[in-house]
Image (tube, rainbow, N blue to C red):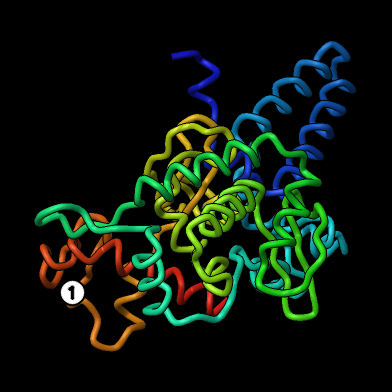
Amino acid sequence: MNPIDTLRRPEYTGENRCGPCTAVNVAVVVAAAALAGIRRRSLAVPVLAVGAALVYLRGYVVPGTPAFAPDLVRSLGLEDRFRHVAPDGGDPERRRESDDLVADTDPGELLGAMFSHGVIEEGEGDDDALYLTEAFEAAWREELETLREASPDDLVEATAEVVPFEAEGERKYDGVSVEGEEGLVWLRPTNATGDVAAVRAMERLDVPESLRAPATTPLRLFTPECPACGGDLEERTVADGCCGGTMGIEDTPTRDVLACVDCGAEVHVFADEGADSDNDEGGDGGDGGDGGDGGDGGDGDDAGEDAETDEIEDADRDATDT
């Protein structure tokens, strides 16, 4: 393995990079280089180069950065420059963005339409898992390829055309922002590409227009290839939040995602089954664990068979709540 690869922390960089954390660390590196230069002029450039490289590869170099960087940026009145920081210290995701092409719809109606219009199907024989139909997968891949070749401005325009309300779009906070009188949607470019492609593919299969946008959130689970680069997707566990914890693995919260093996772009965040069982009346019984593995509690076999169906309905409810 290349020595540089051992330093890389994709869970803290790329689309997961925290703006405030990066800004604070760059400032610290510059200050350290200046101080080193005062002590010995020949040290300034090496210190600056090494520090900048570590911030680029790892996300941050100062221990505890996630604990203080957002508050520091907020106290300086610079929160509007960073998508992660809410002015009141609240959840920034709720303030500026909806990560879905949200629209109110009934989960049962949505699931029924996905079956009746040939978007998804059950496996053969005793296989009750859900899969994309060959026709829809082929259409989705074609639309993904088309959108990957589009310019950023074209992607913004395409996103504004498929949201379930009259809106205008713009490039904002390193993503696609679409705003109208009825709502505001902010999407990472990866999700914008995947969702718009899915809507266009559903249009080919005559899925009712009112159901196309809300279907995109649960369909992310079935994305056939990386919307950003066309690479393969895999389930992985990544650090949660802008940079994870403050000191190390033991205090770093994580989440399970569907991400690209090549570019690291995240396509889908799996539901926290433990949180769902705490909040839902008459839950699955027991802790449940990871839905994809059938869970640790209750009826393991039944949970495994129903996991993907539950994921669709849970994701749609999340989109509706947002």
Amino acid carrying mark 1 in the image: Gly
Side (left or right) of 240 relative to 145: left
Which quarter of the image is occupied by the C terminus?
bottom right
Between 53 and 250, which is closer to the camera in this rendering? 53
Between 320 and 28, the residue placed more toward the observer is 320
In the shown orientation, is residue 275 left or right of residue 50?
left
Return the x and y of residue 131 as percentages of the image width and height: 31, 53
User: Which type of secondary structure does the marked residue at label 1 adopt?
Assistant: loop
Rendered residue at 77%/59% (across/down)? 72
Q: Residues within 10 Å of mark 1 (few under 14, many from 20)?
A: some
Q: Is residue 306 above or below residue 252?
A: below
Q: Give the residue at x 72% y 61%.
A: 161
Give the mark count. Answer: 1
User: Quick one: which residue is furthest to the bottom in this view?
Assistant: 281
Residue at x 36% of width, y 51% of height: 132
Which residue is nearer to you in this view: 317 or 66? 317
Residue 75 x, y percent position in the rendering: 82, 65
Name the residue carrying label 1. Answer: 286
Residue 40 is situated, as x and y percent measured from the top left of the image, at 85, 15
In depth, the one of 90 and 195 nearer the eye is 195
Quadrant showing the N terminus: top left
Question: For this view, does 47 lie left or right of residue 138?
Answer: right
Q: Residue at 66% of width from left, 48% of height from top?
A: 189
